[in-house]
Structure formats: structure tokens, C-alpha cells
Amino acid sequence: MHIQKLETGFSIADAVAPQDLEEVARRGFKAVICNRRPGEAEDHPDDRALSEKAAELGLEWRCIPVKPGEYSDADIAAFGQALDALPSPILAFCRTGKRAVHLWAHARCKDATCDIPALMAVARAAGHDLEERRALLEAGAGQD
């Protein structure tokens, strides 16, 4: 599990296993967002073991499963609502962190004050190039 901070109170990670959640809790995270879809890989038949372990550790759990690169307005809105509603710090994850960073970027760009180049630079520093999504981010900017 590789954790990258994107902003105060929010980080992303690659695949998280139930046993990793103890480390997540030790690092002070209060909530976890899972962006993996049930059955997408052998290591992720569903989120049941993860959500149960999160509850055991006192972590709030939210599952917003998405297919890589395919994010509906409802997915983006659900992610934005999770960012606003869940206690921070929040850790979002998928298999590589890419879906989590994409959803974060799309949710954050809805704010009229969002600095898209700065948002893209933060994502790049975390190992995720958002250039392929620039036009979509710009088109969605300030539409909250």
C-alpha cells in the first residue's frame, strides 16, 4: 500500500487489503473511500471484508465503485459529497490510485475557485498525470 497526500485531509492509495486498514487507522485516517468494483480482480471479490474491518477499527467506510476512466456525474457527485461529509483525514483507493485521483480532481474542479493547473500539478507529484482529463476538468470547472 502506497499512500500519497493530495491535500490537507485527503490522500490516495493503491490497492488496500483488509490487513492494511490497521496501518490506515494507525496513520490517523478517519474514513476510507473504496473506488474498486466488486469482482474486478481476484484480490477484490467485493468490499465486505474491507468494510467489516473498517467498522471494527472505527473507520467510516464509503464505497463508490467505478470502472476505470468512466465516471458519471452521479459518481463525481457522490465522491464530492463523501469528501464533504466524511471525517478527515480521508483515504481513497482503487487498484492503482488512478480512479481515486480522477474522482478527486473532478469533484474539486466543480468549485469555481479551483485552480486546475495546481490540481493537476498535485496529482502529477503523486504519480498521476491528469493531462488526458484536462479538457473534461476544464469543461466541468465551476459547475457546482
Image (spheres, helix red, strand yellow):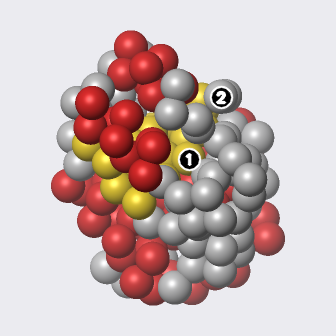
The label shown at residue 93 is 1
| Between 100 and 127, the one nearer to me in the picture | 100
Amino acid type, residue under disc 2 in the picture: Met
Classify residue 54 as left or right of residue 67: left
**Residue 112 location, x and y as percent?**
36, 71
| Between 140 and 104, the one nearer to me in the picture | 104
The label shown at residue 1 is 2
Classify residue 32 as left or right of residue 88: right
**Residue 39 location, x and y as percent?**
65, 65
The label shown at residue 46 is none
Amino acid type, residue under disc 1 in the picture: Phe
Label 2 neighbour load within 10 Å: few <14, some 14-19, many 20+: some
Classify residue 4 as left or right of residue 90: right
- Quarter occupied by residue 99: bottom right
| Residue at 21% in and 40% down | 87
Instruction: Compute the Cα span from label 2 to label 1.
Output: 10 Å
| Between 138 and 74, the one nearer to me in the picture | 74
**Residue 35 location, x and y as percent?**
53, 59
Q: Secondary structure at mark 2?
A: loop
